């Protein structure tokens, strides 16, 4: 835990539950060891949706569809959601969950996000990154191309349960590549001339980036 577990438990106790369907999907996902956004991240995302009011959302990393359903549920305006997933076993579960939520209009694109992103056109006013952490840095050029001016990029799980502050030699060998690439990603977000970014110790860490209009 990045923040004391008792502290997180108390803060989460202050918030109301999600819809019954979201609570059920979350319970099913956790029992199957499928990672979904943590409670504290969910509450932060509700606030960001209320502030941004996105009409076009792109999600990189569908898993079982929890986040896509969550964003459509708590976005205060009508919106379209496009989501990308590469793991064959999770795709039918996500589609079934979209049907349960009466959200079959969610566009689920199957395949490697690095390839799918290159094929996408148009723009999105909110992009939610929650896929393979080692790939974030490689997704970024296309993500920025697709993010409209004044759009918001939210990236989840960027602090790696606190490992991100450690020397690479203090990190388990199998995690060193992710550690190195995530550090590069965080540096790029916080130093990119088109972005204003905050790194927040919420859940397993999120970044919130706003894309500046040209000329600013």
Image (cartoon, rainbow, N blue to C red):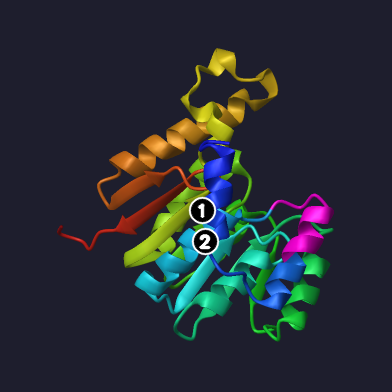
Q: Which mark is residue 161?
A: none
Visible in this render: residue 92? yes
Image position, residue 94 (x, y; %): 75, 69
Q: Residue at x 55, y 27 (%)?
A: 163
Q: Residue at x 27, y 52 (%)?
A: 194
Q: Horizontal placement of 110 versus 206: left or right?
A: right
Label 2 crowd (10 A; few <14 / some 14-19 / many >=20): few
Q: The magenta stretch spans which residues? A: 26-35
Say above or below: 78 vs 36. below
**Residue closer to the observer: 71 or 196:** 71
Label 1 crowd (10 A; few <14 / some 14-19 / many >=20): few
Q: Horizontal placement of 117 versus 69: left or right?
A: left
**Residue closer to the observer: 92 or 204:** 204
Q: Residue under circle 2?
A: 14
Say above or below: 191 vs 24. above
Q: Residue under circle 1?
A: 11
């Amino acid at each position: 835990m990045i923040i004391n577990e008792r502290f997180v438990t108390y803060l989460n106790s202050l918030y109301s539950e999600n819809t019954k369907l979201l609570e059920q999907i979350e319970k099913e996902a956790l029992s199957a060891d499928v990672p979904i956004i943590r409670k504290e991240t969910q509450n932060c995302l509700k606030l960001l949706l209320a502030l941004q009011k996105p009409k076009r959302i792109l999600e990189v990393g569908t898993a079982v569809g929890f986040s896509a359903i969550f964003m459509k549920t708590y976005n205060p305006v009508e919106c379209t959601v496009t989501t990308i997933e590469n793991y064959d076993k999770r795709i039918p579960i996500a589609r079934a969950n979209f049907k349960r939520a009466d959200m079959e209009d969610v566009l689920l694109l199957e395949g490697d996000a690095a390839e799918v992103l290159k094929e996408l056109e148009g723009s999105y006013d909110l992009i939610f990154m929650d896929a393979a952490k080692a790939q974030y840095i490689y997704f970024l050029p296309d993500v920025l191309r697709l993010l409209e001016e004044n759009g918001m990029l939210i990236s989840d799980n960027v602090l790696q349960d606190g490992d991100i502050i450690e020397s690479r030699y203090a990190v388990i060998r199998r995690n060193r590549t992710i550690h190195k690439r995530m550090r590069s990603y965080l540096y790029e977000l916080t130093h990119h001339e088109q972005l204003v970014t905050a790194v927040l110790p919420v859940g397993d860490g999120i970044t919130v980036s706003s894309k500046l209009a040209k000329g600013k």
